[in-house]
Amino acid sequence: MAVTNMQPEVATQLWEQVLEAVRGKLGSQQAFDTWFRPIVPMHLSPQIADLEVPNAFFVDWIHEHHLVALKQSLAEVLGALPDVRFSAREQDALESLVAPGPAEPEADTPAPVPAVPRASGGPLNPRLTFEAFVAGGGNRFTHAACLAVAQNPGFVYNPLYVFGGSGLGKTHLLHAIGHSVLRSRPGARVTYVPAERFMNEMIYSIQHAQMLPFRNKYRNVDLLLIDDIQFLAGKESTQEEFFYTFNALRDAHKQVVVTSDKPPKDIMLEDRLTSRFNQGLVTDVQLPDLETRIAILRNRCATEGDGARVPDDVLLLIADRIRNNVRDLEGCLVRLLAVASLVHRDMTVELAEEVVHQYVDAEPDHLSPERIIGTVSDRFGVKAEAMCGARRTKTVALPRQVAMYLMRQLTALSLGEIGRMFGNRDHTTVLYACQKVGRLVAQDNVFSEKVNALIATLML
């Protein structure tokens, strides 16, 4: 790459590519989120990479554990190995451990408004706000609970414990609470930290006889946001330190919010810590339904500007194929926009199919569409050819609809692809069939048992 003076937006896009390359070289998503997500690229070129990190502890840790992966990724993206320079926002990892409130401005001098709110431990992601969060059936209650905590921290739902699968919005809600509190109370002391970093800082503090400033960091805040608390499972000394930190904050009416991939009872935590979590509000985020996934994509399109107009059939394809991870859902859309722009291709369903295949694993042979059709055909006593033909009699239509429903539930096929398996039927026909069978399963126990028996047979 010959460009030396990059525009800020270009540098940001390149840094995102660097992060993706780094992610593939690390052993865990947790390590990536802990040590690379907080990095802010100040300058990026094939000659120099100036990177800002939260504190000196980050510099030491990255140099010791992740520098090779970082340099390799920079070289892959930039086409050359730049000189890597780190600067720490907090010059000492443990002296500047609590983010102080802003100094009082002089008379007639307007207080500065930070572009990106920062919490002790790292900046809050500017994208992850309540305004950017799409609430749907699977997360509406949790979203409301987070809003209530943000509006009255320390006095409602304390602690707030949010759990759910990867990529469903837990971290988004955590950052959104931090943004909301800092917006309404600019002087609030907010600390955001992944659980792994909490443990690593504690180890560093013990090794360097710095436990007092470490405790001051986490026990003198107004809002403590802990991500992925399940990382503390089995780590008794870290759990004990967190237990006393939690007690100090709760007794002072300070808010604690934690996220996890499981409810408290399913994590190997001390009983007293599990009990503390259960004394507050434990709530989950569930998989978003199709309508919510489409709304998420439209919301992301809006944030990308006028150049991000995507046809409805393309949005439907992405939302239908990527069902289990909002992060992948948005990532697929961003990649599609980039591909269409860089190779000058129209935003079509065909292009979307090419991109989606990189996010969806191939189905195992035993869940092939042909096997599903054959199994349903045998169970209902209807020929497979008739199910895939034009006949619409009830004896054929219902088995056809059941097969469509099973394909949508058990495979990653899109509505359009399922429709093509049944004589090139429209995706709206498939969607209607899936909704109808879904209602029958919920209302008719005999029919539900028949469908469940089909699923059991197919999964053998």
Image (spheres, grey):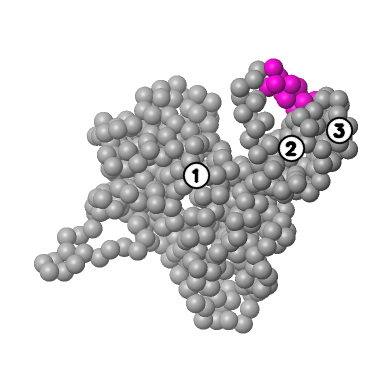
Q: Is residue 86 magenta?
A: no
Counting residues from the start of the chain, the first of labels 1 and 2 encountered is 1
Instruction: Give the spatial CA distance, label 2 vs label 3.
Output: 12 Å
- Residue 123: x %, y % from top left: 40, 56
User: Where is residue 113, by image quadrant?
Assistant: bottom left
Residue tagged 2: 404
Mark 2 crowd level (few <14, some 14–19, many ≥20, 10 Å Cα): many
Give the alpha-carbon distance from disc 3 to disc 1, as whole Å.
Answer: 38 Å
Return the x and y of residue 58 as percentages of the image width and height.
47, 56
SS under mark 2? helix
Q: Residue furthest top?
A: 446
Which residue is painted at 35% across and 64% down in the image?
115
What percent of the width, then of the height, locates residue 331?
A: 59, 55
Dot label at residue 374 = 3
Q: Amino acid at mark 1?
A: Gly
Mark 3 or mark 1: name the one nearer the start of the chain: 1
Label ID, residue 169:
1
Looking at the rendered structure, the kind of residue marked 2 is Met
